[in-house]
Image (spheres, helix red, strand yellow):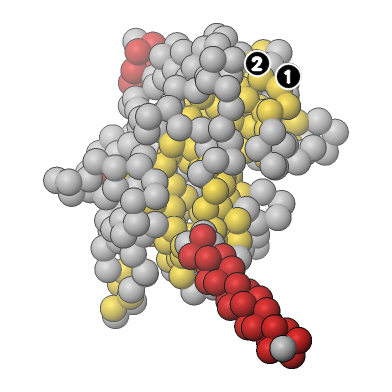
Amino acid sequence: MERRTFLSKSAVATAGLFITRDLFKQKASPIYGHNGMTYQLNTKWGILNADKTPVNDCHEMIQDIKGRIILLTNETKNNIIIYNKSGKLIDSWGTQFPGAHGLTVQHTGKEDFLFITDTNTHQVYKTTIDGRIILTIDAPKDLAAYAKKEAFVPTETTVLDNGEFYIADGYGAQHILHYDEKGNLKNAFGGKGEGEQFLDNAHGICVDKRNGSTTLLITDRTRNAFKRFSLDGKLLEVIHLPGACVCRPVIKGDYLYAAVLRSPDLNSEGSGFVTILDKENKVVSNLGGSAPVYENNKLKPLYQTEKILFHPHDVCVDDEGSIYVAQWASGKVYPYKFTRV
């Protein structure tokens, strides 16, 4: 009797173990991505008390020298929200940026500075990490395209090691404006036009050093492409991404990451995903999007396959390889986090 009772209890325990394992498997988060660049999604990572720390459109995110994740939103109760990597609120500030859009960090080795573009005030601001404005850039009226300040609708910036910086006027006259570290205009290129050297929705810009030289990668969103320019504005390369209205390029290690706001078709509402390119400018993975397929060295159109993102507007890749996603016009959702698996 004792032996039969022992065996019966053992069988029940073993069955329970398998049931628990099966339930665990069922509850495990889905894995997104391709070709070894795969991630699990956490949609609850950045949720805060919306009465105390609200968001409107979550536009862009960066990581500062302290490892904190900084979000820019056009909610003027707190334009800047500072998280730790676990999604805990550390601090918030900013009430003066109604059109807060672009957020770039300048690492100097001693301290960090932020560059914030505002599409409503038609200005770009350089601030300390705690919000003190130390430089304001207005429309460059010496250029004919900017006779009226409303023509200047800056969306993004990037900074060189020497402190010089570039502004992408992605919602305005489409020029890329090069300034010295004190805010004096040095050069302008791009602008509207039909040739490849021109831009249409120059939404983002970043410095790329991956191949041994320093160049600029600039978004040409309407044409579904990134374009590589020299620092003085000469077109060097076009990276076509059919099916992807890409936002700003973000470089981390050997990879380029970007939020895809939507696919350019008639049913593009809520069709966003995240795309990842390698050092050779080949798409290797899409989070929530189709597997990349090349035929005769030409990328077939990309598209959303999973309804996990609505209008992703930017990505931040932290020092552990996790990806944070800020979304525009997506029901005031807080940022999501993808963890590499």
Residue drawn at x 69%, y 33% is: 88
* Element type at mark 1: loop
- In three-dimensional space, the C-alpha distance between marks 1 and 2, rounded to whole angstroms, equals 7 Å
Q: Are marks 1 and 2 in contact (CB under 8 Å)?
A: yes
Q: Nearer the viewer, mark 1 or mark 2?
A: 2
Q: Residue furthest front?
A: 1
195, 13: nearer the viewer: 13
Residue at 58 percent of width and 27 percent of height:
48
Q: Position of residue 154 (x, y in %)?
A: 44, 25
Q: Say which quarter of the image contains residue 9.
A: bottom right
Q: Quadrant of residue 121?
A: top left
Q: Amino acid at mark 1?
A: Asp
Q: Nearer the viewer, residue 14 or 47?
A: 14
Asked if residue 17 shows in the view, the reply is yes
Residue 129 image offset from top left, x and y in percent: 72, 24
Task: State which quadrant residue 1 falls in.
Answer: bottom right
Q: Where residue 130 is drawn, which disc sits there?
A: 1
Give the crowd class for mark 1: few <14, some 14-19, many >=20 residues within 10 Å: some
**Mark 2 closeness class: few <14, some 14–19, many ≥20 residues within 10 Å:** some
Q: Residue at x 14, y 46 (%)?
A: 266
Up/down of 283 relative to 44, above or below: below
Kindly tell me whether residue 116 is visible in this rendering: no
> Which residue occupies the foreground of this view, 64 or 104?
64
Where residue 337 appears, x then y in whole percent? 56, 47
Which residue has dot 2 on it?
93
Amino acid found under the numbered disc labelled 2: Trp
